[in-house]
Image (tube, rainbow, N blue to C red):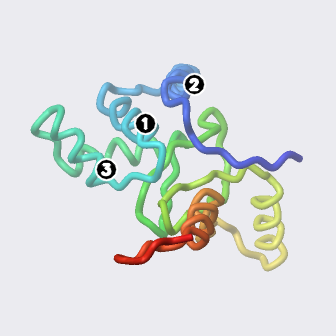
């Protein structure tokens, strides 16, 4: 079992995969659903519904919150995007052609989110639920902390001397 971290970089490729999955499932990926999906995928980081609404209004002028939420609900139900509950934001799914539960690592400094594709995590939660006689309906595992890039930036910032007026730094 391979564990990998995924950041979504190829929005166009992701859209093609989702279009194909929609066709195979007999789903209708309407122009609005696709546009919302493209906005989520191109964001490259978690995006809030009202940020999506603002972008749609820039393009169309008349977008309304229920329209965006209906599109997001469809994309969520189909597993094409994930909702990060703790920050009330959405990210594209790295494996949109298959239904799965994945944990996310969320950076509290830069707001990036990494999908951890390791089926052992979901299997462990499922087996523990069964052991307690609990029937889960959904899994949401979000781990907050600081990503590698932000840790490096903080370390470099701490190591860089601060210049003070009238004094030279060594």
Q: Position of residue 58 (x, y in %)?
A: 16, 38
Report the residue that reaches farthest toward the left: 61
Q: Give the left or right position of residue 57, taking residue 33 as reference.
A: left
Say which of marks 3 and 1 sits in front.
Answer: 1
**Which residue is painted at 42% across and 58% down in the image?**
89
Asked if residue 37 can be seen in this view, the reply is yes
Do the residues under discs 1 and 2 have CB atoms within 8 angstroms?
no
**Which residue is painted at 26% across and 54% down in the image?**
50
The mark found on residue 29 in the picture is none
For disc 2, the marked residue is 17
Say which of marks 3 and 2 sits in front.
Answer: 2
For disc 3, the marked residue is 69
Q: Secondary structure at mark 3?
A: helix
CA–CA distance in space, label 3 to label 2: 22 Å
Above or below residue 69? Residue 71 is above
Quadrant including the C terminus: bottom right
Report the residue that reaches farthest toward the right: 1
CA–CA distance in space, label 1 to label 2: 15 Å
Q: Position of residue 164 (x, y in %)?
A: 40, 77
For disc 1, the marked residue is 42
Mark 3 vs mark 1: which is more N-terminal?
1
Q: Secondary structure at mark 2?
A: helix
Crowd rating for badge 2 (residues with CA inside 10 Å; few <14, some 14–19, many 20+): some
Say which of marks 1 and 2 sits in front.
Answer: 1
Above or below residue 44? Residue 108 is below
Mark 1 vs mark 2: which is more N-terminal?
2
**Which residue is painted at 56% across and 55% down in the image?**
113
Asked if residue 138 can be seen in this view, the reply is no
**Which residue is painted at 66% across and 45% down in the image?**
6
Mark 3 vs mark 2: which is more N-terminal?
2
**Image quarter for residue 99?**
top right
């Amino acid at each position: 079992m391979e564990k990998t971290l995924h950041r979504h970089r190829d929005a166009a490729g992701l859209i093609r995969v989702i279009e194909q999955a929609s066709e195979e499932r007999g789903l209708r990926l309407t122009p609005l659903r696709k546009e919302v999906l493209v906005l989520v995928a191109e964001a490259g980081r978690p995006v809030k519904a009202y940020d999506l609404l603002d972008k749609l209004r820039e393009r169309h002028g008349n977008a309304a919150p229920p329209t965006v939420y209906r599109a997001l609900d469809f994309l969520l139900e189909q597993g094409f995007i994930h909702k990060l509950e703790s920050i009330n934001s959405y990210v594209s799914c790295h494996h949109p052609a298959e239904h799965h539960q994945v944990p996310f690592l969320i950076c509290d400094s830069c707001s990036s989110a990494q999908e951890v594709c390791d089926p052992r995590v979901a299997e462990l939660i499922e087996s523990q639920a069964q052991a307690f006689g609990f029937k889960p309906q959904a899994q949401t595992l979000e781990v907050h902390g600081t990503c590698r890039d932000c840790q490096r930036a903080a370390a470099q910032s701490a190591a860089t001397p601060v210049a003070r007026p009238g004094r030279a730094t060594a």
